[in-house]
Amino acid sequence: MSLVPAKRALASVLVSLLLLTGGCEKKKPQGQIEADVTRTPEKWLEMESVRLLRDYVRIDTSIARGEEEGARFLETFFQCAGIEVEVVCPAPGRCNVLARLPGKRSEGALLLLNHIDVAPADPKTWSDSAPFEGKIRAGYFYGRGAYDMKSLALAQALAMRSLKERGVVPESDILFLGEADEEIDQKWGSRWLLKNRPEWFRGVGQVLNEGGTVEVVLRDPRFWGLETVQAGYASAEFEADAAEPLKALAEKWRKLDSPLVETHPHVRVGLDMLANHLSHPLTFYLRNPDRVRRNPAELAAIPDRYGSFLEPRITWYPVLGDPPNAPKVYAILGVLSTPPELAPELWLEPLLEDASRRGARRTRVFSGGRTSASPYPTPFTELLKRVTEAHFRGVPFGPIPTYGAFTTSVVFRQHGFAAYGFSAIPMNITDTARRHSSNERLYLRDYVNGVNLYRDVLEEFALQP
């Protein structure tokens, strides 16, 4: 179905205006950076989006507390905006938020996906702020969930409200899902809803979630990666009363045996884009994945970040010990990564059996199952590219695969939905490392710009067939 001429023209004009006005965020004048760093918390909080972020992050939605209070916060936001919303709690305290902005039809609907829960936070390891304080300092906002992923949830919610306030009726429905239990077990969120509330997802054509790789250098993005496929992910944590069984297990499972697998087309494109920003010999390796797959020396030289898309990989991590007065227990964590279409269970099950034979006790096991890719390019991904390039001129945009993590985009793909990871809020690599660690923080100017970018993405979508 085509747009009527007036709407097609309006869709093009929106992007053209961005290019001619202040919509482009490519270069940030030094004066702006200085102003952002020296702006007082009170001045930042004059912005509604920043106040909402502070209030949302101050709600402890870690697994110990559950998501209900955070879900009610979002429910109130949508109720005040006049957008239909419901809270679904499959278990006490474990709550999801479902909101819908009706369009002219349900087919081709866009689902905005985020999670309410946050990774655990130990206040003793935080030095820059308390985990749920919502502190602002030198242009940064500190708090657990600041980036992962309450800021993106608010960008989605504010974009929906913007359409509602201006009376824009989307061509297709726009849905919002703030899910429970994404960080730990993934039992009460998307998996539960897809099984028990499948009618709510009827008509969804694409899902927009967290993910994507945006490399920031000196506050400017160098490339914008859309996540269309992830490496398979599984993890297993073991403990024992002595270190030797765990050391032997990790040594035995230091490398995984596997036949050669074909490089996925999206992985080829993503590795080639990444190669532009890496040094020799990685540049050569990433541009020639077929040669590398057949050369054991070159394959071994590639870090897991890239190599796990060419062969299965496993990485072992020590687990922090018990308090000084507790009985001594040794623990390790093994993380499996597999190329798309290869199920991690092919290696996870033998690993678990071997650990049991050695007397290692499993304490936590997770597997995301086989991963697959969402279609690319599509009219929807071209929309994302067009609007992003209007805000950040000259920044390359394309599919970059995700490694070493698992998002519920995989779950939706396993149910037949096209799902994409899109990071509207850029983050530099040092801040990325804080997301599940101590002192998680978000650069507020990037957040404000990301809110504007998301608003324009939804406005473009609202005018599309």
Image (cartoon, rainbow, N blue to C red):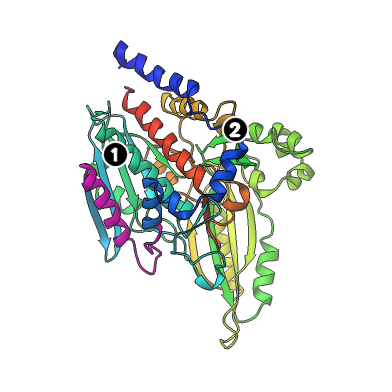
Q: Residue at x 26, y 37 (%)?
A: 202
Q: Is residue 249 inside the magenta stretch?
A: no
At mark 1, the secondary structure is helix
Give 234 or 439, whichever is nearer the viewer. Answer: 439
Return the x and y of residue 115 as percentages of the image width and height. Answer: 39, 52
Any magenta on residue 75? yes
Neighbourhood count class around disc 2 (C-alpha, 10 Å): few under 14, some 14–19, many 20 upward: few
Residue 17 visible in the displayed image: yes
Q: CA distance from mark 1 to mark 2?
A: 29 Å
* Amino acid type at image mark 1: Arg
The quadrant the N terminus occupies is top left
- Does any portion of residue 356 appear in the rendered image? no
> Horizontal and vertical percent for residue 261?
62, 39
Q: Is residue 206 above or below residue 47?
A: above
The residue tagged 1 is 161
**Decide: marks 1, 2 in contact (CB < 8 A)?**
no
Front residue of 300 and 2: 2
Picture coordinates of residue 401, whole percent (x, y): 56, 40
Q: Residues within 10 Å of mark 1 (few under 14, many from 20)?
A: many
Q: Which residues are magenta?
A: 57-84
Dot 1 or dot 2: first in sequence order is: 2
* Quadrant in the rendering for residue 33: top right
Residue tagged 2: 27
Q: Closer to the observer: label 1 or label 2?
A: 2
Identity, as a three-letter code, of the amino acid under mark 2? Lys
Residue situated in front as seen by the camera: 122 or 115: 122
Residue shown at the point (44%, 60%) measured from the top left: 134
Secondary structure of the residue carrying tag 2 is loop
Looking at the image, residue 57 lies above or below residue 375 = below
Q: How many marks?
A: 2
In the rendered image, the vertical position of residue 239 relative to residue 32, given as above or below: below
- Residue 352 lies, in percent from the top left, at 55, 65
